[in-house]
Image (cartoon, rainbow, N blue to C red):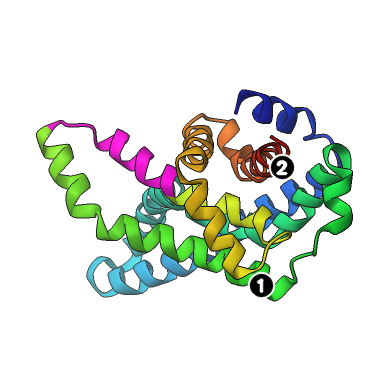
């Protein structure tokens, strides 16, 4: 996994990967900005009758707090969902440099499928973490490993999302399901490495792109072994 990380880090300057990084971050922050504007208007309208002329100031403050919380809690879900749309370009760039024979036999993932995979990734993250929210709260109240539980759950989720970004280029649905089953424990380490990147300031902005690149190395290194 360390080799996959450093190979991925060294390829960040690749024009194709750089384009995906810029586009994915632009779309991600645009979505948060649009959500923030909508939230501000909603809060302002709700407070207008109660606070009158002071509603604007309170709306700004509450929206700022909500956006900070949203970036902290939801950035991973949105960023991975967005980068999933462009992931095929990342995988192709890594294959072109390191696995040219695999690139020749790859089947590019169509945009509708990439969008479906990205949306599915985001919905799984939100849905499963909301489902486990009571568990997180109990762990927080008892002082037992809430952060560790959150990290492990999201590592498990990422292990599927990142793996599928690569496998979809080389396998049909049935083969992908068999591959997921056969590589579960090893893929979990991939997901754990990617999840850890999301908690490191600065690296968290690069984590979705690095994760997709690392997944490409993971997939092909195992096939060559």
Q: Name the secondary structure under disc 1.
A: helix
Left or right of 97 in this view: 191: left
* Vertical arrangement, residue 16 with respect to residue 109, above or below: above
Residue 76 seen anywhere in this rendered image of the structure: no
Q: Tag count in the figure?
A: 2
Q: What residue is at 16 percent from the left and 39 percent from the top?
A: 139
Q: Residues within 10 Å of mark 1 (few under 14, many from 20)?
A: few
Q: CA distance from mark 1 to mark 2?
A: 22 Å
* Vertical arrangement, residue 112 with respect to residue 67, above or below: below
Q: Quadrant of the N terminus?
A: top right
Q: Quadrant of residue 82?
A: bottom right
Q: What residue is at 80 percent from the left and 42 percent from the top?
A: 94
**Residue where numbered disc 1 is placed:** 113
Label located before the other in sequence (1 or 2): 1
Main SS of the magenta part reads: helix
Left or right of 65 in this view: 184: right
Q: Quadrant of residue 222?
A: top right
Q: Which residues are magenta?
A: 143-156
**Residue where numbered disc 2 is placed:** 220
In this view, the residue in front, 213 or 26, is 213
Q: What residue is at 42 percent from the left and 50 percent from the top?
A: 64
In this view, the residue in front, 177 or 152, is 177
**Residue 148 is a magenta residue:** yes
Q: Position of residue 122 (x, y in %)?
A: 49, 61
Q: Name the secondary structure under disc 2.
A: helix
Q: Quadrant of residue 34?
A: bottom right
* Vertical arrangement, residue 206 with respect to residue 88, above or below: above
In this view, the residue in front, 154 or 68, is 154
Q: Position of residue 63 (x, y in %)?
A: 40, 56
């Amino acid at each position: 996994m360390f080799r996959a990380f450093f190979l991925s880090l060294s390829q960040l300057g690749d024009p194709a990967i750089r384009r995906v990084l810029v586009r994915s971050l632009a779309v991600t922050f645009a979505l948060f900005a649009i959500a923030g504007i909508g939230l501000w208007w909603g809060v302002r309208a709700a407070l207008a009758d109660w606070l009158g002329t002071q509603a604007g100031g309170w709306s700004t403050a509450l929206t700022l707090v909500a956006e900070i919380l949203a970036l902290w809690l939801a950035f991973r879900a949105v960023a991975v969902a967005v980068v999933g749309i462009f992931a095929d370009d990342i995988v192709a760039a890594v294959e072109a440099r390191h696995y040219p024979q695999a690139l020749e036999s790859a089947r590019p993932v169509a945009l509708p499928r990439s969008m479906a995979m990205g949306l599915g990734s985001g919905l799984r993250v939100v849905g499963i973490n909301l489902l486990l929210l009571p568990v997180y709260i109990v762990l927080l109240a008892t002082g037992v490993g809430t952060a560790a539980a959150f990290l492990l759950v999201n590592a498990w989720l990422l292990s599927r999302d990142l793996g599928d970004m690569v496998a979809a280029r080389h396998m049909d649905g049935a083969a992908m399901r068999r591959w997921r089953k056969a590589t579960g424990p090893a893929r979990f380490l991939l997901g754990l490495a990617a999840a850890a990147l999301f908690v490191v300031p600065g690296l968290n902005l690069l984590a979705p792109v690095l994760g997709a690149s690392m997944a490409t190395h993971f997939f092909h290194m195992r096939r060559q072994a």
